[in-house]
Image (spheres, grey):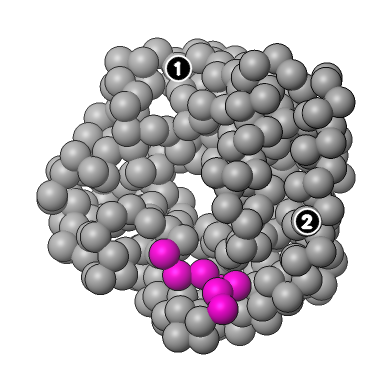
Amino acid sequence: MLAFSSCWNNSRHTDGEEMIEEIVNLGFTHIELSHGMSVAKVPGIRKAFQRGIFTCAGVHNFFPSPVEVMIDAPDAYEFTSHRSCDRQRALDMTFRTLELAVEFKAHYLVLHMGSVPLNPQHWSKCLTQMVAAGRQTQPAYVKAKLAFVRKREKLAPLYYYRALDALGTIAERAAAAGVKLAIESRSHFEDVPSEREMVNLQDHFADNPWVGYWHDFGHVQLKHNLGLLDHHEWLERISPQLMGGHVHDVEWPARDHRTPFSGTLDYAALLRFFPAGCPLTWELGATREAAEIRDAHAIWKARFPDRS
């Protein structure tokens, strides 16, 4: 199933029905209702859904945004937070998102699980700047990367187990709702879970059919470009837990959410790991032009007719 995320045009609309109609006019009828959505758009989305002009592939936490958060900030509340009130708010908003997922007959709910308290500006961004300058083979880069990994590994267990505990609670609600939980690969190594933690998390829920792995093509490629993993090897390792993915491209080394075929990703090599019929949701940046998306969509359908 090929779908399209409303993150592309959410910020340009005040009416949810018009937002949906613009995506449908691109040629997509399966839509992921994304984070950053104001509650004021929900009635319009509901109208479009009742008209039958789209099906809801999935939703992305938090949908809608917390009313007190005035910007698109899916990580405003984290399951890993030191503040118990923030952890509870994250759970409450997730339960609300699950209710809407049921209303719109969504197949999945994409979750961010939190982070380790390390500032990406100091760690991931530093590595990215060195790679952009062509320094990734220099000893200084290797030293910085190893220091980053060691620092994160030392701090991580507390935050991983907070995320795991929250997910156990959410999974009970998801099972009752009949909505699968898609745990997303993240763009920064500071985020939870890391790939090693993702394997442990998926093993922990191995007997739970409502929890699986959501592969973000661009996020994983960013880590690949920093030498933190190998994209193909990672997909092969995690493929038994794959539920679907966010599709976008990456311009070297770290500009993601680009239109497919405009960057460096080899989709043919990566798609072979995905089970037939699983959702592949285009998640594009707001600056991507409609004509560019239509052209890429035509190429996609020609190259991957069984993935369209």
Badge 1 local density, few (<14 within 10 Å), some, or many (20+)? some
- The reply to whether the magenta stretch includes residue 81 is yes
- 282 or 257: nearer the viewer: 257
Q: Give the main secondary structure of the magenta stretch.
A: loop
User: In the rendered view, would you say 211 is above or below 60?
Assistant: below
Q: Which amino acid lies under the numbered mark 2 shown in the image of this protein?
A: Lys
User: In the rendered view, would you say 181 is above or below 220?
Assistant: below
Q: Is 56 placed left or right of 20 in the picture? A: right
Q: Which residue is drawn at 22% across and 56% down?
A: 45
Q: Can residue 128 be seen in this view?
A: yes
Q: Which residue is drawn at 40% across and 75% down?
A: 93
**Residue 233 at x, y percent in the picture:** 85, 35
- 165 or 173: nearer the viewer: 165
When asked about the image quadrant of residue 210, the answer is bottom right
**Residue 14 at x, y percent in the picture:** 13, 49
Dot 1 lies on which element? Answer: helix
Q: Is residue 99 visible?
A: no
Q: Which amino acid lies under the numbered mark 1 shown in the image of this protein?
A: Ala
Mark 2 touches mark 1? (CB < 8 Å): no
When asked about the image quadrant of residue 229, the answer is top right
- What is the span of residues highlighted in magenta in the rendered image? 76-82
Badge 2 local density, few (<14 within 10 Å), some, or many (20+)? some
Circle 2 residue: 151
Circle 1 residue: 296
**Residue 296 at x, y percent in the picture:** 45, 17
- The reply to whether the magenta stretch includes residue 171 is no
